[in-house]
Image (tube, grey):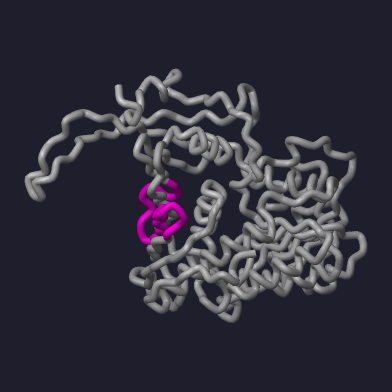
Amino acid sequence: MKKEELSRRQFLSKNAIALSGIALSYAGLPLWAQAQAKNEVIRVGLIGTGSRGTGLIKLIQGIPEMQVVACCDPIAEHLANGIKQAARGAKAYTDYRTLLEDKNIDAVIIATPLYLHYPMAVAALSAGKHIYLEKSMTYDISQAIELEKKVNQSKLVFQVGYQYRYYGLYHKVKEVMVQNWLGNITHFECQYNRNSNWRFPVSDPKMERAINWRMYKAYCGGPLSELCAHAIDAVHYLTDSHPLKVTAMGSVNYWKDGRDTYDNIRAIYQYPKDIKVSVTSVLSNAYNGYGIRILGDKATLEIQRDKAFIYPEVLSNKRGTVDGVTGATIAITTQGKGNELVFEKPGEKSLEPTVYALKDFVNCILTKSKPASNATTAKDSSIAIHMGNTAAETETMQIWKPEYSS
């Protein structure tokens, strides 16, 4: 058998893969799993108690080292929902600046519309609060560059909510890539599809934009910033790089309901080593939902929500055949049966990826460590997102500029 051909037996282990785990030192390996946590509780103020914010409070309920002692939201119903989930006696605020004045708060979680991320993060830094900022980091490129500078000038922990950097599934995928199980990787295919208008009910028409801010470019970057951000950041983590250029096309071709953010977008990025990365989001068809496919000449690896499968390339005709159209000799390859990638230790309880991220946030505060998802990694992902949106809006190729790099 030729070296370039991948034996099916190399992949099979009771129809699963449990790699031996070579001694790799990943920047994304959770510190909470490496360090002994101190017996301390981080008092958290949560800014933005909409659907994501209240979801985070529920997760924090299972983390003894964290306690939500204050909530802030200008929408009364959202604020009431947050206080209901927070610790007993939690304070309620309608102005985040007042919350930041509270000396009993050690850290803040910012889960607000994207356009508010930068001013709120800057204010929290000035108030001396550690920050967990939901993705993506900023509304535009200049804010991303400036916020990284401000974070680096502080001695505070700043983490962005790209939880897959803390998820063992992605650590194992990176290990597979480093061990060359996939061979020469040339393409990533990323998608996040839904069949939904992405709207929340609004009782008062005056609150339309405040509640359905994802529909409007004045408040966010649409599907690229709100849905595809995780996949883009995952590509950065897995390749240890950022894009060199991007072209894209987007529109509103289905949900013609007054929105101006796209309901569909397709972007193609070029990364170092001539790796092409396609990023797609469609809001009128949910086929296959979320996923990342990594294409190598030995195998394809498909990442789903909480599992991954490897499909080896099987050569069915070593001599190849002649293409009847071009006359060129081509090899016939077929995709082998998918084998599940095992990433959890036997008996280990799997947690929601965000829990791993929040636990690491606590430990970074206690150990004065830098998070795996930090201002620099999040800046690069934020810039990539904005490059993609700009490429679609202007119908031009967008190039990574030298000033974008740290």
Task: In the rendered view, tell whether residue 320 sits above or below residue 141.
Answer: above
Query: Which percent across, then down, holds residue 139?
Result: 60, 72
What quarter of the picture does the C terminus occupy? bottom right
43 vs 190, nearest the viewer:
190
Q: Is residue 162 left or right of residue 13?
A: right
Which residue occupies the extreme bottom position in the image?
A: 206
One can see residue 113 in this view = no
Task: In the rendered view, tell whether residue 367 sits above or below residue 276.
Answer: above
Occupied quadrant, residue 172: top right
Q: Residue at x 25, y 34 (%)?
A: 334
Query: Which percent across, then down, holds residue 343?
Result: 56, 31
Which residue occupies the extreme right position in the image?
A: 103
- Magenta residues (range): 270-292
Q: Is residue 127 left or right of residue 226?
A: right
15 vs 62, nearest the viewer:
15
Q: Residue at x 67, y 62 (%)?
A: 111
Query: Which percent across, then down, holds residue 278?
Result: 39, 56
206 vs 114, nearest the viewer:
114
What quarter of the picture does the N terminus occupy? top left
Q: Is residue 149 left or right of residue 98?
A: left
91 vs 358, nearest the viewer:
358
Query: Which percent across, then down, holds residue 204?
Result: 59, 77
106 is within the stretch colored magenta: no
One can see residue 145 in this view = yes
Task: In the rendered view, tell whether residue 108 sits above or below residue 363.
Answer: below
Number of marks in the image?
A: 0
Q: Residue at x 58, y 74 (%)?
A: 140
Occupied quadrant, residue 281: bottom left
Q: Is residue 398 left or right of residue 31?
A: left
